Amino acid sequence: MIGRGGMADVRSGHDSRLGRTVAIKRLRNDLASDPTFQARFRREAQSAASLNHPAIVAVYDTGDEVDADGSHVPYIVMEFVEGETLRDLVREGRKILPERALEITADVLSALDYSHRAGIVHRDIKPANVMLTPAGQVKVMDFGIARAIADSSSTMTATAAVVGTAQYLSPEQARGEQVDARSDIYSTGCMLFELLTGRPPFMGDSPVSVAYQHVREEPVLASSVEAEVSPDIDAIVSKALAKRTSERYQSAAQMRADIERALAGQAVEAPVVAVPSGDDLSGATALATTSMFAGPDEEPQELTRRRRPWIWLLLGLLLVGLLGGVGYVLVQGANNDSVLVPDVVGMKVGSATAELRDAGLEVSTDEQASEEPAGRVTSQEPADGSADRGSVVEMVVSAGPDAVNVPTGLVGASQPAAVETLRRAGLEADTERAASTEPRNQVIDASPESGTAVEPGSTVTLVLSTGPAQVPNVVGQRQGVAENVIERAGLAPYVTFDSNASANAGRVVQQSPDAGTSAGSGDQVTITVSSRPDETQAPPPEPTSEPTTSEPTTNEPTT
């Protein structure tokens, strides 16, 4: 399981034909019987499959899978992207420099410009739908709520009236009105604000309050939250967050061009942001945005007088619409006890629990075996949206993968059969070789042994027979040499001594089994070593012919 969204589960898979890892997005079982959701899911596949851009997650294939109850559940096979979402980056509290935030946003706008030209509005641009690869590449994903621009002029259905996450909704989405590409511009502005400051431009206790702020309130300047934000960046964000679509950037390419000017140190085309003072602001920050299609100047007093009745009428209509439940962000109505449910899937259980409790919710957990690392949240109910304050969010937490037992029947099997048995059990095989009386390439041992509980994907070492070993001839060799020769043959030397042997001490005088006998790996070879010392004697001394040194005798007569 890679992740779980509002309408689909995403798992990793392997494309055996092209030898690549893919992501498989499958409609959730609890929604599979709903024709409306099935149609929306298929529309996602059709929309995303037509997009081919380096900053957009590619769609490879689509189809239906027959479930256990016989129902057809649609799925999408997509590009597998390694990395993390911008939401993860922000939640971890990692600082994103303004220049890097602009670069990321420029890449998102490049993807949006491409999709808009193809007639597709994303409608749900937010940090959770933008991934950053380890190489720094931006990937926009989840065009699941995108619809063709050509269809956006028609009346929106109840299920698709307002789609998107409350903190990134455009004013027209919050009012349930028809949307176009400029709605994505507004959501991108919200995302850029969060990348710069670490928080979205509008926050509240309920979707209603957040949606109301999108319609009526002006956001604070990003520079008032993060001092490193320059006036030019403030101008870009403010123009993207203009309430009127006519006062925003009119295309993703236009906003991207202004970002590139800011990165190059050039003046941006967005109007400079002013912060006027006065009681008429009621403490809110005023944004001096200029309509791109403004007509001739009018007298302020006359303009105010003419607009005042319409302002009150518009305000009344907005309140009725907001409190009447336009879209999913208003499902709970004007209930002051309704709070936003954070999306905590993929987070560590401790961090997820803290975030949910900070939002005013209670938590229950259920540990289940999963391919995800132990301690990670794999799903939550309810998913992100809204819920009553104090209600319980049920989290499923990964206990890690289930242990598997090393299968039986490995010893005595052939190498291919044993490897296939391990593969079916989700285990890997490694091999070693040893001499044995068993046939060549037959498994003679396995480690860990059969029945041992191991983690999925663990490696089991198979010892394969190389066939019988031949006992070497070591008679006459010195003891140390003989032992080495026997060990190199895969056999085990066993030494005895014979003090009555006639050979020089330290020499092998006998062995068992005899040389040339077949033996299995590790079989014992007994060698008998002479312990009698050498009996060499020094030669006797040779006789000498020299006279002795005694007194000489004389034959002279005595007198």
Image (cartoon, rainbow, N blue to C red):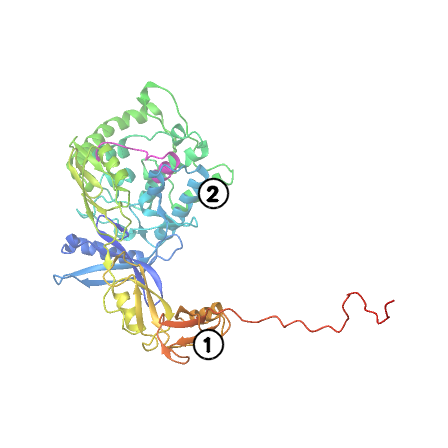
What is the total number of numbered labels drawn onto the structure image? 2
Question: Which percent across, then down, holds residue 262?
Answer: 48, 38
Work out whether residue 529 or residue 465 is closer to the camera in this orientation and state it.
Answer: 529
Picture residue at 37% right of the left edge, 67% below the top: 432
Question: Which percent across, then down, holds residue 259?
Answer: 45, 41
Which image quarter: residue 454?
bottom left
| Relative to 472, residue 36 above or below | above
User: What residue type is disc 1 on?
Assistant: Val
Q: Which residue is mark 1?
A: 475
Label located before the other in sequence (2 or 1): 2
Quadrant of the snapshot with the C terminus: bottom right
SS of the residue under disc 1: loop
Which image quarter: residue 275?
top left
Crowding around mark 2 (Cα neighbors within 10 Å: few <14, some 14 to 19, many 20+) is: some
| Relative to 308, residue 15 above or below | below
Q: Is residue 42 visible?
A: yes
Q: Which residues are magenta?
A: 190-207
Q: Which residue is mark 2?
A: 260
Instruction: Tell me the number on the disc at residue 366.
Output: none
SS of the residue under disc 2: helix
Picture residue at 30% right of the left edge, 65% below the top: 446
Picture residue at 57% right of the left edge, 71% below the top: 536
Question: Which percent across, then down, holds residue 114?
Answer: 38, 52
Crowding around mark 1 (Cα neighbors within 10 Å: few <14, some 14 to 19, many 20+) is: some
| Relative to 339, residue 143 above or below | below
User: What residue type is disc 2 on?
Assistant: Glu
